[in-house]
């Protein structure tokens, strides 16, 4: 329930009958002018794109507001079950264009701006990305929020309002440089601060037992430092359906009590320092997409998110049902986006036990039937662990609870495998050793009724390998939910020309039922249709080329294959394999080979600032690019570009122009991938390994429309026993030439031994990514790509087939499956007041 000071004198009656803001051109012009002149204080002399953006943003936000309130009212009245997506990351990207599309006022707004002499595209492109995430996991959360609102499901997203999002990347002499992304330095027109829903979060101190007035004993958490969590709400509009859901992000602020006490105690400097440490919690997103082990601030962030969000849900519950929690698990479900918010298991227990005085068994029944955990990784090094010492110091009461959860769990293990003491050790939530650790994935599995992976293969591997013992005890918990992406942003928004052609051909229902794209299949045989398809793809390529030319001063041949690998830079994603292929093509072109299709290879992605190898890969790409792009012998036949500062809005510009989508991870390592889906939806053909969602893409589109290569996950494991990259290199002339050129220092003439470590890792028989093992098959399949591309009719058919078969990869399908199998929420239509 809201803090009382904010609701005491709410003038409800006076504001009951507000008239809705119109959606017509004239209404938008009127609001825009009001904001521009009266709110922002600008006049017709000012030609600032930024202020125009703010004025239009607020104009649009006003139109969301009424629908947002109506959605709240609808959910409140229905009193039905709700779900909460708990995620440390939301990669929302830009909001303005998406809001206009979902409100259905794109045309009206464009005409309104036109009439005012303003280029709306310039305003749209001027918006900063909300980059509160690293990559796939964060963007998935954003796509899911869009689908939940479009499917009219009562789902609230909870996250952190980082002051600094994902760093911006610049490239200096080929090296990545990171700059802080202070995205909030300008006004964020999309957020609403809701002081009335603030909560206190505790850190440190100690636990004790106290007896209450009825003689009952309870645990209390004493002498803790308290930090205030203030929510900022962002509206999430559904697609043309009146629903506006909420993304609630918490900001940390020093509490007033703590200010007064500390400041009055005389130690002013210490007090200021402490205030800072409270406010630091939500200062910055950790820019690492695998792990950042042991950082205390990260653990603080996780607990801050979890505690504030659960308190929020519980206070809402108490407001409706008082202290009766018997129906709580029937009405609330928490989806944990990886282990990052898995402290929720212990925190919900704490709140129910200590604040609401439930018995352990009742509290556990509620907790373990309201938590659901999604795993996003198979890399063992990415499994989160926290030292027991740190955990205890920061969250003493939670540590006690985790120990108790574990003790009870281990007795179940003992009953399942009597006498098998090794199982107790390997399955324990606490990893024993010199420095005992809390295994967060195990805590999440033990505390959840559902555990899912994000693609078929990934979910199978979780059951067969990573969590096999847990699967043996609880097979019913395990399930798969293949990822998806929202077609509103990734097709309708990013590629309006292609979207229009599709709508003109099959109607517009595909926007909320993407499987309808199947009816495009017959048009692959229609010559006129293919011609239009091709011309749309060509103009998307031209736009991308013009933009990059302007930015980097390189000339791009738009008749070349636009060969795209955009994703975080990581060894398992094998950007190095792509570089080996580029060097191979370079050698062949230099040798006068004429059978090669012209190619423009586009690579983009950020490396975690502490991941030296990944940074070195970026440097290698840039050095190879410099040599190739400046070689007059190969002009127009091959170019390599590293596009700096890859982010959501960059992908929106890239994916319409992609011909070839590179999904070349070592089989068994990429949990799903979602860039593969975005490019498929925009008519790119995939060259990929048998990994993650590639497998399902292949199944949908058929092997004639997909370039499959490389070892399977099983073969990768078998290969590892006798892997000998040096001998593979010796026995392959092309590979020998590539490695020789690389080792000769051709790409680092003024920087000796710069790439030694990369070369050594490729030749290491323990290379976990077995890059060299897949070289031959990759080169061969790329030769097939060339043949297909040089036959334009065949290529366009493949492109059409990819879009036509991309229906499965809508996040609407994913969310419907989450809902049917896990959340079981009612769809709640929001009625328009007009
Ligand atoms: C952990 C501890 C400390 C600091 C950071 C982290 C951290 C942060 C982000 C660990 C992992 C991530 C992100 C992981 C991620 O994005 N995984 C990707 O998730 C996608 C959505 O399911 C999949 O499609 C990708 O295959 C998977 O790599």
Image (cartoon, rainbow, N blue to C red):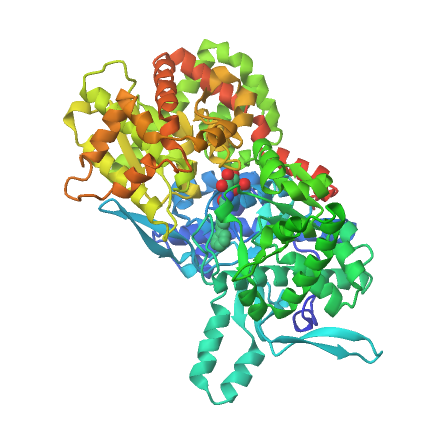
- Judging depth in this view, the residue of 646 and 531 nearest the camera is 646
Residue located at (47% from left, 51% from top): 291
- Judging depth in this view, the residue of 656 and 506 nearest the camera is 656
Asked if residue 190 shows in the view, the reply is: yes
Q: Position of residue 571 (x, y in %)?
A: 39, 40
Q: Is residue 260 above or below residue 275?
A: below
Q: Is residue 527 above or below residue 248?
A: above
Residue 274 left/right relative to 462 = left
Residue 193 left/right relative to 776 = right
Asked if residue 540 shows in the view, the reply is: no
Q: Is residue 258 above or below residue 138?
A: below
Residue 155 left/right relative to 112 = right
Q: Position of residue 478 (x, y in %)?
A: 68, 39
State the residue lying farthest toward the right.
Answer: 214
Q: Is residue 404 above or below residue 752?
A: below
Q: Position of residue 634 (x, y in %)?
A: 19, 24
- Judging depth in this view, the residue of 425 and 290 nearest the camera is 425
The C terminus lies in which quarter of the figure?
top right
- Give the total of numbered labels: 0
State the residue lying farthest toward the front.
Answer: 419
Which quadrant of the structure image shows residue 517?
top right
Q: Position of residue 580 (x, y in %)?
A: 30, 30
């Amino acid at each position: 329930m809201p803090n009382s000071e904010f609701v005491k004198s709410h003038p409800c009656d006076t504001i009951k009958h507000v008239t809705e803001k119109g959606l017509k051109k004239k209404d938008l012009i009127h609001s825009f002018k009001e904001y521009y002149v009266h709110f922002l204080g600008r006049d017709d002399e000012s030609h600032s794109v930024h202020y125009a953006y703010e004025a239009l943003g607020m104009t649009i936000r006003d139109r969301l507001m009424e629908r947002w309130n109506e959605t709240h009212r609808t959910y409140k009245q229905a009193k039905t079950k709700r779900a909460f997506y708990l995620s440390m990351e939301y990669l929302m990207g830009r909001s303005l264009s998406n809001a206009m599309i979902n409100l259905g006022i794109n045309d009206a707004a464009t005409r309104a701006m036109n009439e005012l002499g303003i280029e709306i595209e310039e305003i749209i492109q001027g918006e900063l990305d909300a980059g509160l995430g690293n990559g796939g996991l964060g963007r998935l959360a954003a796509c899911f929020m869009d689908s939940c609102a479009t499917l009219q499901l009562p789902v609230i997203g909870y996250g952190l309002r980082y002051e600094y999002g994902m760093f911006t990347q610049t490239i200096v002499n080929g090296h990545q440089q990171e700059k802080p992304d202070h995205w909030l330095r300008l006004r964020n027109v999309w957020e609403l601060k809701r002081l009335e829903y603030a909560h206190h979060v505790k850190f440190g101190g100690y636990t004790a037992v106290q007896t209450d007035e009825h003689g009952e004993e309870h645990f209390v958490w004493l002498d803790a430092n308290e930090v205030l969590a203030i929510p900022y709400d962002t509206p999430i509009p559904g697609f043309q359906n009146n629903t506006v859901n909420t993304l609630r992000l918490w900001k940390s602020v020093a509490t007033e009590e703590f200010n007064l006490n500390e400041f009055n105690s005389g130690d002013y400097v210490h007090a200021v320092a402490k205030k800072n440490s409270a406010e630091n919690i939500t200062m910055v997103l950790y820019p690492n997409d695998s792990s950042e082990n042991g950082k205390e601030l990260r653990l603080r962030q996780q607990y801050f998110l979890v505690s504030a969000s659960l308190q929020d849900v519980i206070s809402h519950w108490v407001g409706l049902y008082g202290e009766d929690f018997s129906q709580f698990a029937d009405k609330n479900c928490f989806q944990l986006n990886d282990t990052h918010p898995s402290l929720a298991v212990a925190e919900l227990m704490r709140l129910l036990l200590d604040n609401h005085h439930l018995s352990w068994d009742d509290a556990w029944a509620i907790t373990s039937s309201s938590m659901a955990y999604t795993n996003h990784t198979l890399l063992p090094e990415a499994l989160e662990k926290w030292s027991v010492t740190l955990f205890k110091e920061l969250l003493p009461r939670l540590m006690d609870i985790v120990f108790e959860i574990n003790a009870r769990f281990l007795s179940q293990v003992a009953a399942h495998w009597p006498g098998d003491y090794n199982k107790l050790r390997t399955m324990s939530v606490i990893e024993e050793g010199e420095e005992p650790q809390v295994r967060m994935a195990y805590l999440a599995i033990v505390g959840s009724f559902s555990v899912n992976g994000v693609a078929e293969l990934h979910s199978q591997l979780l059951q067969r390998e990573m969590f096999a013992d847990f699967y043996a005890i609880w097979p019913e918990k395990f399930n798969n939910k293949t990822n998806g992406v929202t077609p509103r942003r990734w097709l309708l928004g990013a590629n309006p020309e292609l979207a229009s052609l599709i709508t003109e051909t099959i109607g517009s229902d595909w926007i909320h039922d993407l499987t309808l794209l199947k009816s495009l299949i017959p048009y692959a045989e229609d010559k006129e249709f293919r011609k239009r398809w091709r011309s749309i793809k060509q103009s998307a390529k031209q736009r991308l080329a013009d933009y990059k030319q302007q930015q980097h001063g390189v000339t791009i041949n738009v008749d070349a294959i636009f060969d795209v690998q955009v994703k975080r830079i990581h060894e398992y994603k094998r950007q190095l394999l792509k570089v080996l292929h580029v060097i191979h093509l370079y050698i062949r072109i230099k040798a006068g080979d004429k059978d090669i299709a012209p190619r423009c290879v586009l690579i983009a992605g950020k490396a975690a600032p502490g991941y030296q190898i990944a940074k070195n890969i970026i440097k290698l790409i840039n050095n190879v690019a410099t040599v190739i792009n400046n070689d007059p012998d190969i002009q127009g036949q091959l170019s390599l570009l590293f596009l700096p500062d890859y982010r959501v809005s960059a992908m929106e510009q890239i994916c319409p122009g992609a011909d070839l989508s590179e999904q070349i991870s070592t089989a068994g390592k990429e949990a799903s991938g979602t860039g593969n889906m975005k490019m498929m939806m925009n008519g790119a053909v995939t060259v990929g390994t048998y990994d993650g969602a590639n497998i399902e893409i292949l199944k949908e589109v058929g092997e004639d429309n997909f370039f499959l290569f490389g070892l399977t996950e099983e073969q990768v494991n078998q290969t590892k026993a006798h892997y000998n990259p040096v001998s593979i290199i010796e026995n392959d002339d092309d590979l020998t030439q590539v490695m020789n050129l690389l080792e000769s220092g051709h790409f680092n003439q003024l920087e000796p031994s710069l790439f030694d470590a990369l070369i050594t890792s490729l030749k290491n028989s323990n290379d976990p990514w077995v890059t060299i093992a897949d070289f031959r098959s990759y080169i061969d399949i790329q030769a097939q790509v060339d043949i297909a591309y040089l036959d334009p009719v065949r290529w366009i058919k493949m492109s059409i087939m990819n879009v036509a078969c991309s229906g499965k990869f809508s996040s609407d399908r994913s969310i419907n499956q989450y809902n049917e199998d896990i959340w079981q929420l009612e769809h709640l239509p929001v009625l328009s007041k007009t």
